Image (spheres, helix red, strand yellow):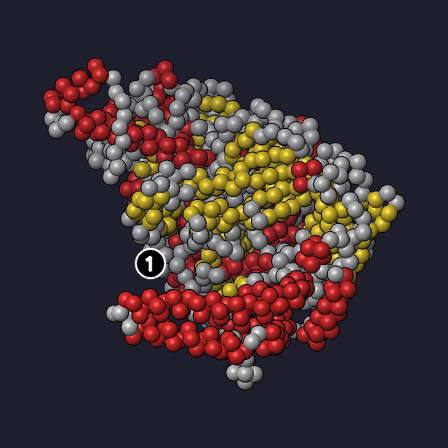
Amino acid sequence: MSIVNLWLKTFLDILFFPCRSFSPWIALIFISFLTGLFLLAVYKVFSNQQKIKIAKNRIKAHLLELRLFSDDLVISLQAQGQLFFWNLKYFLQVLRPLVIMVIPLSFLLSHLNLWFAWEPMPPGERMIVKIKLKEGVNLQNFNISLESTEGYEVETPPLRIEAEKEINWRIKALKSGKFEMPFWFDNQKITKEIIIGSNSWQRLSPVRPASGLIRELLNPGERPLSDSLIEEIVISYPSRRLNFFGLKIHWLIAYFFLSIITGLILKRPLKVEI
Amino acid sequence: MGKAKIKIDKNLFERIKKYAGIAGYSSPEEFITHCLEKEVAKLDEAESEEEIKKKLQGLGYIS
Amino acid sequence: MKRRQFLELTFLTSLTLASNPPFIYGRGKRETPLKVLILGLDGLDPNLVSRFIKKGSLPHFQRLISQGGFSVLGTSIPPQSPVAWANFITGMDPSGHGIFDFMHRDPSNYLPVFSGTLSEEPKKKISLGEWVLPLSRGQIKLLRQGKAFWQILEEHDIPSVISRMPSNYPPAQTKQRSLSGMGTPDIMGSYGIFNYYTTESGEINPDIGGGRIHQVYVIGHQVEASLPGPVNPFRRDRPEATLDFKVYLDPVYPVAKIVIGHEEFILKEKEWSGWRRVEFPLIPGKSVRGICQFYLKEIRPHFKLYISPVHIDPANPVLPICTPADYSRELVAHLGLFHTKGLPADTSALDNNVLNEAEFLHQDNGFLEENLAMLDFELQRFHSGLLFFYLSSTDQRQHMFWRFLDENHPAYDSQLARQFGQEIENIYIQMDQLIARIEKYLDKKTVLIIMSDHGFNPFIRGFNLNTWLFETGYHKLRNPWVQDKGSLFEYTDWSRTKAYGLGLNGLYINLKGRESQGIVNPGSEYEHLVRELANRLEAIVDPLTGKKPIYKAYITREIYKGPYLNQAPDIILGFNWGYRISWSSPLGKFPSEVLEFNRQKWSGDHMGAAELIPGILIANRKIVHPAPSLTDVTATIFDLFGLQIPLEMKGRPVLKIS
Ligand SMILES: [Zn+2]
């Protein structure tokens, strides 16, 4: 898992490097284009293009039949049965490339989320840092402290919320940059990355999770924690919305839309049957 | 409009029936509805008075 | 400001700019030879200014006066801010603009109504089970009559910016930039209702005006409560919309997290949250947005949380608070969130010990800072025409801290006086520093006018007008033994009542044909009654002091002649120095005593006879008129721009143009 995450992270870091000083839209359009291409390629390779073509033609034919013989009950019923059968066949043909796509796509999505879903807090602003503990850990006996650094100041003592199994702090951003937050407990140090900045677009990792397949898949920004008591460390970065002529939209919507458009435009020139 | 039933003391109902006719209502139902509407309207108004007072009281000059 | 907001707003602004090139506001773009900058400092008192200048506390005032002029400024009758500023806005007296008090009465039911604004719910609605859907638009109307001076300037193509002008909600129609001030309600539609959550039962009397006290409990280091919002007009039973919230307390440290709607923030004991957004759901897809401040007063031994009145969100105003419609949004983009409710200082919270003096000052200083930042912002782009900017802190601080100026005030407290005895002087000093702060924007062609609407005097004794009317037989109650119970004339027998008091200075006759249950005949019966009442009121002597509580009872018909005279009280009380209407008479109550001591923290006021508490006029030009009044300043504006003074205005220009 870590290997895949590291590889993807590096890949995107390199890919987006030239886009960093522009609007996130540029990078999003770029990656959506690549995704569209990639999806078409997977489709072409992992589906039986011939069979899809046949299925689609049959569907069209039966649709036509339905329209022409709408008065004739027997033919209509037969056509409907055929339509259902060929739809199912088409679906089975499409299923394979779809299943194959899902795995790399979900990795990609959780990585793109780091880039597009959050924005850093500018100096002077305040945010909440949370440590979530695993079930069964006693909060009262869990002595942990968070230190201030040059990038931020810890403004409150730890706030322990038994009901949520959480410890919260309020920090104030002081200086732009990438910093390490040191948490101390039992003479052990664990860290979490924090990014403070005013107007740069960059990858942010709101969550450093404990190790675990799903947790790591969903939070690929940092290496998983090896300690067994902590479930995750979370920074409440503000969420980012993309501006689309005054509308504030979530990046995922723009991304899917753009990828699909890419696919639809390129399927003819690349001769892909979908 | 929907209708709901309510229970009422028999003696009272007899008296209502008597006076409904005298007061010129076409039925005891009409009489009862009219009476209740009048009372409810009073309460509605009382509530809006309370609302008025609350809204004005934020003004520091009065209490 | 939060980064997210910032981005949203920058984007919004850039959109606005793109769609509205520099001459965005259409009319009013002429380059004027003179620029006029007017600071409206509510309640700035000429006696105190003189006193503090003598003491040497106000060097910038002193210099300004030596270069230009200083005068007392005749105030309105009555000298209440909404009335006085409306005089200035229209250049007319109250019978010309129709504002006679903070509140008027509805002659059809004798209930008090807001004098400045009428809100009407949609007339056509349909009911669908529990729900009510409006089919037409409701409306909010400014009741002040007459043209505002900036509307006339606009007709002459002269630009103006009018910020926080009282008696201007909703703002008068204009393409110029204007932001409403005093009279702008909170999101409940009220003059301001704070919420206070406490575990200490009986700490605060729950039956107070201007706030609600909620008893809460700490269970498992958590407090669950809800914040009341506006009435939900979409529901048949019209409940209040509410927003539930949770507070998580640390078991040991004095720190807590508040989670409300989309907001989540941590406060230490005695910390303020700054502005937070709240959203009250009405029906799916429709909600009302507001902003409010949280103050975590105490965590242990008792949990105490104060939430300010919920202001209209200037980034998303649900009610019309500015012109053009995106002006408040533009200000938020540059300055962050700011208060929108008129008279934002929470005097009710201080008066009821929910906030103490230091907490009250902390909050009001924040409001003042927001205003000063806004003034700076507008001054930076003030190149032509007129800029008016209003501040309420001068008025509100004098109301709350006057008790420390006089050891004999019934609310004087020597310990508090040591700590806060300087606060009134301090706010005057802050205004002095404001003069220094704006100096860099003043060039040769800028005329600076500093004005107030009225002065101040102590509020030591309260006069229960309605009790007096009851005792003298002009007002009859159905059951006299419930005299001190009830309010809003609950027990009044209108069929035998000749007069009633409502509002802060008003006395009305129960006039046949005007009041729904009027008994006094118009004509000579009315004239005689009014004369008789005025004479008797002026003759009252306070047995405790030997002074006359009412310095002058103005018969409205004798002092005013304008078209809106028919809406005026029949008599306007001008109180003597140290006196005022009592706390509960304005809302139709009948306390047992006619005269009573005022022991509240609200200890200074301005409801006296106009001649006793004039306002102030200071300018960087010579004042040529010996006894100027508010309407003269309006005339002066037209004169400075070389315009003819409109016929309906009575004032004369008072500044020398050189
Ligand atoms: Zn005042």
Q: Position of residue C460 (x, y in %)?
A: 53, 28
Return the residue nearer the eye: A86 or C177: A86
Q: Residue furthest toward the right?
A: A187
- Type of the residue with mark 1: Leu
Q: Chain of mark 1?
A: C
Mark 1 residue element? loop
Instruction: Name the residue rendered at 51%, 24% in the picture.
Output: C597
Q: Which residue is mark 1?
A: C647
Using the rendered image of the protein, determine whether residue C172 is visible from the camera's viewpoint. Answer: yes
Judge whether C409 appears above or below C140 on screen. Answer: above
Quarter of the figure that contains the N terminus of chain C: bottom right
Q: Position of residue C181 (x, y in %)?
A: 48, 50
Q: Residue at x 52, y 42 (%)?
A: C243
Front one among C459 and A47: A47
Which residue shows up at 33% across the image and 29% down it?
B43
Q: Position of residue C118 (x, y in %)?
A: 36, 46
